[in-house]
């Protein structure tokens, strides 16, 4: 199971590298605040948050349903720079 998570994390990292820099900085900052890691929740973080293997797999296989809410502060963040 850990191997699959690492593969998904690698794909995620490639996609993040394709994200324009200002937005990537915003996302990384949010991830650090939320998960303590710029790339988002680690496998260990998810396990320590009492996620089951099934929940981890399900979460890795779908996009964030609240992406508009996650990114809504971006414009204000960018203007403050």
Image (cartoon, grey):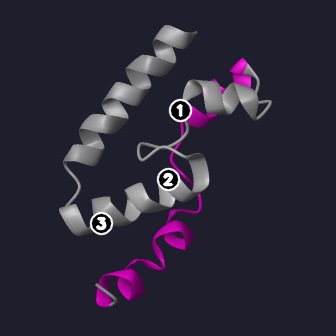
> Relative to 40, is 18 on the left or the right?
left
- Which residue occupies the foreground of this view, 62 or 74? 74
Q: Is residue 35 above or below residue 42?
A: below
Q: Are the residues tagged 3 and 1 within 8 Å (C-beta)? A: no
Q: Are the residues tagged 2 and 3 within 8 Å (C-beta)? A: no
Horizontal and vertical percent position of residue 36: 55, 46
Which quarter of the figure has residue 11? top left
The residue wearing badge 2 is 32
Q: Are the residues tagged 1 and 2 within 8 Å (C-beta)? A: no
Q: Which SS class for mark 3?
A: helix
Residue at 53% across / 67% down in the picture?
70
Q: Which residues are magenta?
A: 53-79
Kindly report the distance in space between the C-alpha atoms of the residues bearing marks 2 and 3. Answer: 14 Å
Q: Is residue 50 above or below residue 41?
A: above
| The magenta stretch spans residue 32 | no
Q: Which comes before the other along the chain, label 2 or label 3?
A: 3
The residue wearing badge 3 is 23
The quarter of the rendered structure image containing the N terminus is top right
Q: Which SS class for mark 2?
A: helix
| Secondary structure mostly taken by the magenta-highlighted segment of the chain | helix
How many neighbours does mark 2 have within 10 angstroms: few (below 14), some (14-19), or many (20 or more)?
some
Q: Which comes before the other along the chain, label 1 or label 2?
A: 2
> Relative to 64, is 25 on the left or the right?
left
Horizontal and vertical percent position of residue 4: 48, 14
| The magenta stretch spans residue 71 | yes
Q: Nearer the viewer, mark 1 or mark 2?
A: 2
The residue wearing badge 1 is 61
Q: Is residue 48 above or below residue 16?
A: above
How many neighbours does mark 3 have within 10 angstroms: few (below 14), some (14-19), or many (20 or more)?
some
Residue at 46% across / 70% down in the picture?
71
Residue at 54% across / 12% down in the picture?
2
Kindly report the distance in space between the C-alpha atoms of the residues bearing marks 1 and 2. Answer: 22 Å
């Amino acid at each position: 199971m850990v191997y699959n998570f690492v593969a998904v994390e690698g794909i995620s990292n490639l996609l993040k590298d394709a994200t324009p820099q200002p937005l990537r900085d915003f996302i990384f900052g949010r991830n650090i605040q939320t998960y303590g890691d710029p790339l988002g929740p680690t496998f260990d973080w998810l396990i320590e948050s009492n996620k089951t293997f099934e929940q981890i797999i399900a979460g890795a296989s779908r996009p964030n349903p609240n992406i508009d809410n996650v990114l809504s502060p971006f414009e204000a963040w960018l203007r403050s720079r």
